[in-house]
Image (tube, grey):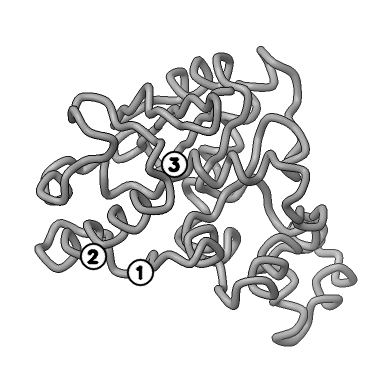
Amino acid sequence: MKTLGVDLAAATKKTAVAVIEWSGGAAKLVHLELDVDDQGIVDLFGTCDMAGVDCPVGWPDALVPFLTGHAAFDAGPVLAHDGIAGRRLLAYRDTDRFVTARTGLIPLSVSADRLAHPAMRCAVIQAKVAALHGPQARDGSGRLAEVYPAASLKIWGLNGRGYKGRGIPEAERLGVLLDALRSQAPGWTWPGTGTNWPDRTTCSTPSSLRSPPAPWPAVARSCPAKPRPPPR
């Protein structure tokens, strides 16, 4: 089984992908790449059994009629979301509320925060994937899953806070996180190091190591024993 993880940015720059091959209870990182364009993601999707993307794959159901009503000067759908409670339905999806209820974390809003730009790119990539491989369900029941690495790390009992960045403190926190992963998954291999996992000293240099481990939540997401978030 191969899983693709995509740390999606709004543009090719800073977009990272990783492919993990799973066999006999072990995992091996077989592909790692930075600055990946849309076609690269689509091509890798075609070679993998499951793909996890660290980006919202859709918008709140209430948002479309709200915007359509506003554009058409139809006050009904707009006034239906008057007040803070109504606006929360426009800002957050059922998926977001599921994550908050299960982990206590509050995801960024895809419609009212800086995730909007990457989400637009994600929608385009989904359309490109659909053209070659058919439409992919957005609830994780097929080959595509939206993943939230911070929530996954928390559920796994790992500290996913404060490791992003280029400073020494961030590199040290990343080293602690990798040590914890190494102890929990000794059978996983990291190519090019001669060891099962990268040494702590490598954490301060390759920017790829600072990317969230999107392929791992993708694997957990494909397991039927795991709870699935409700449809949007």
Mark found first going from the N terminus, 1 or 2: 1
Nearest to the observer: residue 207 or residue 59: 207
**To which residue does mark 2 refer?**
173
Return the residue found at the far right.
76
Instruction: Give the label, 1 or 2, closer to the camera.
Output: 2
Considering the numbered disc 3 on the image, is that residue within a helix, a strand or a loop?
Answer: loop
Badge 2 marks a residue whose secondary structure is helix
Query: For the residue carrying disc 2, how many other residues have a C-alpha within 10 Å: few (<14), some (14-19), or many (20+)?
Result: some
**182 in relation to 100, above or below:** above
Q: Position of residue 155 (x, y in %)?
A: 56, 65
Task: Check contact, mark 1 vs mark 2: CB within 8 A.
Answer: yes
Residue position marked by numbered label 1 in the rendering: 161
Q: Nearer the viewer, residue 226 or 139?
A: 226
Look at mark 3 in the image and give the residue it sits on.
8
In this view, the mark in front (1 or 3): 1
Name which residue lies at 56% across and 22% down. 45
Residue that appears at 29% across and 69% down: 162
